Image (cartoon, grey):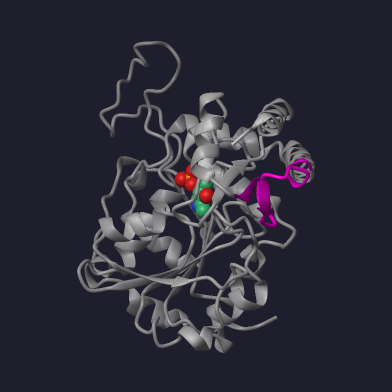
Amino acid sequence: MRKFEDVKIQVMEIQKLVRPNIKALAPYSSARDEFKGEAQAWLDANENSLGTVSGGEWNRYPDPYQLAVKEDLAKIKGVVPQQIFIGNGSDEAIDLLFRIFCQPGSDKVVSFTPTYGMYKVSAAINDAEMIEIPLTSEFQLPDFNSIKDKVEHCKLLFICSPNNPTANLIKAELIESYLLNFQGIVVLDEAYIDFASDASFASRLQEYPNLVILQTFSKAWGLAALRLGIALASPEIITYLNKVKPPYNINAYSQQKALEALQNVKALNETIAFLNGLREELNSQLSELALVKKIYPSDANFILIQVDDPNALYEYLTELGIVVRNRHSVVAGTLRITVGSDLENELLIDALKKYRP
Ligand SMILES: *Cc1c(COP(=O)(O)O)cnc(C)c1O
């Protein structure tokens, strides 16, 4: 296994990337930070001691660090709880990374286009310049040496694998070369990794002090409504995320439901296998249609297709109540289609068969 020593950027240098005001920050100390354990009388947090007006037991503040969830999640991910941060969706983790590492108005970050739009929005909110570098024609990362000069002094570098909206995995060797050579934080968004044929980089966190992996409960776990994003990283980086986050960022209901989901790994694996089967079926049905000019290879739960007139086709499907994502403005000629249920996929294919431009 590769050691921390081989990576250009060392743990000590991670500290140097952090904004000085964040390094100096004395975080808010909540009631649950100051006393943990059992008590006879909970009189420290100004909650309603009688209960909840509508029934149920929601009158107590939730665990600010979601330790029960992290313990079970850690076992599944092969990490320790200290390497896990849970956010109110992945978007919260993305925003916090900007706030920790990027001085508004001066620091820069990098992404590879086309990709997930949230990185750029979060950069704009935090007044960090986003340097956008095109992926290759195969939607792979360019060779690190060819972009080295452009990314010098950048604080964060976003890699999305499998990438949204192109659906392909980024080659592991390329990701490794970026982790070894980029002198900032590499944020590897693995929102769709559960559907992919490559393994997660989670098992390799020990090798890379500058790696932050984003995962989510929103896709394979089927819990998008709960808003639960995951960041996996070195304990040093997780400590900063905890320092900057709102004290009770994950509500009690979400924590409870996440814990329940974590007891159902077998069902998770079955659902992944089933959805991947539906993807292959949808893929072969789409490939038989003349109007589909190209199907991009997918390692996710969606398929990007190219057609002659994506705007017209989008309108046609929408009128039939079939909503896909028009990605024409991002990748010319394309629509992004989520793998649906059997019934949804059938509705889509039937509609496409009847389409007369
Ligand atoms: C869906 C998705 C996420 C997950 O976002 P949540 O806020 O956790 O729901 C993250 N990254 C990418 C690229 C996505 O497509």
Question: Where are the magenta residues, as a range?
Answer: 285-307
Q: Quadrant of the N terminus?
A: bottom right
Q: Quadrant of the C terminus?
A: top right
Percent x, y of residue 332: 51, 56
Above or below residue 257? Residue 126 is: below
At x 60% / y 42%, what residue is drawn? 337
Please indicate, yes or no, whether residue 229 appears anywhere in the rendered image.
Answer: no
The x and y percentages for residue 149 are: 40, 88
Number of callouts: 0
Q: Position of residue 146 (x, y in %)?
A: 50, 87
Check the image and report above or below for 268 versus 297: above
Q: Nearer the viewer, residue 280 or 220?
A: 280
Q: Is residue 277 left or right of residue 338?
A: right
Left or right position of 18 against 7: left
Query: 326 or 260, which lies in front?
Result: 326
* Res. 251 visible in picture: yes
Residue 141, percent from left and from top: 56, 74
Q: Residue shown at 40%/58% (left/top)?
A: 119
Q: Which residue lies at the image location 38% right of the left edge and 42% below the top edge?
A: 249
Rendered residue at 54%/46% (across/down): 309
Closer to the camera in the image, 239 or 46: 239
